[in-house]
Image: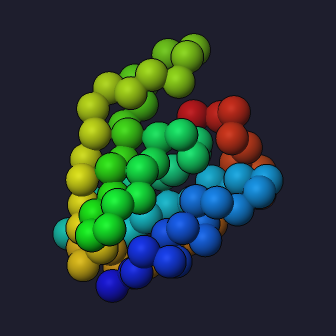
Amino acid sequence: MVDQQEIIKYWKQRPFQPFRIYMVNGDVYVIRHPELLMVGPTYLVIGIPVPNHPLLLCDHVDRPSYEEIVRLEPLPSSATVGSS
């Protein structure tokens, strides 16, 4: 399980470095923009962007709990914030 403070460390890092969130069920969320993540007391709100859209628009959201998160991993430095 990943706790709230570990998520906040990745989320608030400046300059922002995109990262992955690995879930216990095998799902993986790629967080490329800090604006698409909201950190709550017991869960996250992860905005899933509209595919191939030039603006940062949210298609839908997922709300996983911290207990469902296995680990966090930074993306390689070549994965810039502007890429999708």
> In the image, is 40 to the left or to the right of 74?
left
- Percent x, y of residue 53: 50, 16
> In the image, is 57 to the left or to the right of 75?
left
Residue 65 falls in image quadrant: bottom left
- Percent x, y of residue 17: 69, 56
Residue 48 falls in image quadrant: top left
Q: In the picture, which quadrant includes the C terminus?
A: top right
> In the image, is 56 to the left or to the right of 41?
right
> In the image, is 80 to the left or to the right of 35?
right
Total tally of numbered discs in the picture: 0
| The one of 78 and 7 positioned closer to us in this rendering | 7
**Residue 43 seen:** yes
Residue 60 falls in image quadrant: top left
**Residue 52 seen:** no
Residue at image x 61%, y 71%? 9
| The one of 21 and 43 positioned closer to us in this rendering | 43
Where 29 sits versus 1, above or below?
above
